Image: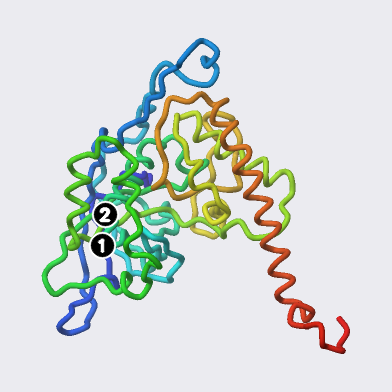
Amino acid sequence: MTFHQNSIKSVTLDALVQDSATNDFVPVALHRLTVPLDLVPARYHPRPDPQFDRLILESIPERPPSLLPPLGEAHLHARLGKFIGDGHSSVVFELDDVQLDSSSPDPQSVPRLVVKIARSNRLAALAREAWFYDEMECLQGSSIARCYGWFEVDLSSGQSVPAWSEHPVEDPDERDFALESDKNVHPDQLKRAARRDVLSILVLERLGERLQPGSHPDDVQSDVMSLYEDVSHLGISIAQDVRRQNILEAPRDEPCLPSLPSPFTGRTHSWRVIDFELSVKINYTPLQFQMSYDSHVVHMFQDAEEEARLDYLLASPCAVEDDYSDSEC
C-alpha cells in the first residue's frame, strides 16, 4: 500500500514527554486532527478601477480539490531524534526508529521524517501552518515538504516537554501572528491561545540542508524564485518570511520519495520552501505576487553573499589586527 500524506491516524512518540516526578520519559499517543476549512480567513482586496485587473482578482482563489484517498488507519511509532532547529513558535527534531503497524503501508515507502513541535504558547501558530499545508496539498513533494498530518494530545498533570525548556525562545512575549494577523480569529484559535497543556505537532518529510551563505548560480536563484511562483498560483503570499533559512534542499538521503513536477510550471525543483506561519491568502494575481517576491528574493541572495563575506573576514587573521600591529596579513 502507498504511504500517502493522510495515511497516519495516530502517532506514539518516545523521548519527548517526561514524567516530572521520576524524570523518566513516557510514551505519548497523539491523534490526528482535521483542520477546519475556515480556520484562516482570506484577505480580500477590492479592485478600485479597471487598471488593477491585471493585479487583483475578482475573488479569492479556491482551494484545489484534494487528490488523496480516504483517511488511513496507520499508526506510527517513533523516537525523538536529533535536534534540527527552532524558532519563536516551534522546535524541530528528526524522528528515529520509525515503525508502522501491520495494517499500515509498506515501510519501504516511508521517507525520513521530522516532527515540528509547537511551543506551549504557540498552538494557534502551528494550527495555522497546518491549514496552509492542506491549502497547498498540490505542491507537497514539489515546492514544499510533504506533510503527514497535524496531531495533538492533552498533557496530564505532572508531564513536561523538555524540548520546550532546552530550546527556549529569545522573546517568550513576542506577539502571536496567528492571532493578530486575522481580523476574524477563529474560535478554535482563541481556545488554543489560552491553553498551555497541549502537545501539538506536525509530521513532515525530512528535507536537506538549508540554503547556505555565499554566491549562488543563476540556476539556483531561478529555481528558488520558481518556488514562490508556484505558491502564488494558489493565491498565497509568504513574502513576509522570505529568508535563506526557509529554503531547504529537496530530500536526497534514502529513504526518501522522489520530487514531483510543479503542477503549474512542470518544473522539478531541487529546493523547497518551508514555514508558513506568516502566510496569508489573498486575491492577488501571479503578476502582483511576482512584483512582490522579486525584490525580496533578490535581497535574500544578496544578503547570503554579504553573510559569507563577513564570515570570511571574521575568520581571517586580519580581522583581529589593529593599527598598532606589526604583523602582515
Q: Which of the 4 quarters of the picture holds residue 26? A: bottom left
Crowd rating for badge 1 (residues with CA inside 10 Å; few <14, some 14–19, many 20+) = many
Residue 228 showing in the rendered view: yes
- Horizontal placement of 187 versus 279: left or right? left
Amino acid type, residue under disc 2 in the picture = Leu
Residue at 74% across, 82% down? 320
Write down the residue under mark 2: 123
- Horizontal placement of 75 versus 133: left or right? left
- Horizontal placement of 299 versus 98: left or right? right
Write down the residue under mark 1: 120
Residue 1 showing in the rendered view: no
Quarter occupied by the C terminus: bottom right
Q: Nearer the viewer, residue 70 or 290?
A: 290
Q: Which of the 4 quarters of the picture holds residue 12? A: bottom left
Amino acid type, residue under disc 1 in the picture = Ser
Where in the figure is residue 112, as x and y percent of width and height?
44, 59
Residue at 43% across, 53% down? 205
Residue at 22% across, 55% down? 152
Q: State how the image is colored.
A: rainbow
Q: Secondary structure at mark 1?
A: loop
- Horizontal placement of 101 versus 110: left or right? left
Q: Nearer the viewer, residue 111 or 224?
A: 224
Residue at 72% across, 76% down? 315
Quarter occupied by the N terminus: top left
User: CA–CA distance between discs 1 and 2?
Assistant: 6 Å
Q: Is residue 291 above or below residue 300?
A: above
Where in the figure is residue 145, as x and y percent of width and height?
46, 48
Q: Nearer the viewer, residue 211 or 302?
A: 302
Farthest residue toward the top? 50
Q: Is the C-beta separation of discs 1 and 2 under 8 Å?
A: yes
Where in the figure is residue 178, as x and y percent of width and height?
32, 46
Crowd rating for badge 2 (residues with CA inside 10 Å; few <14, some 14–19, many 20+) = many
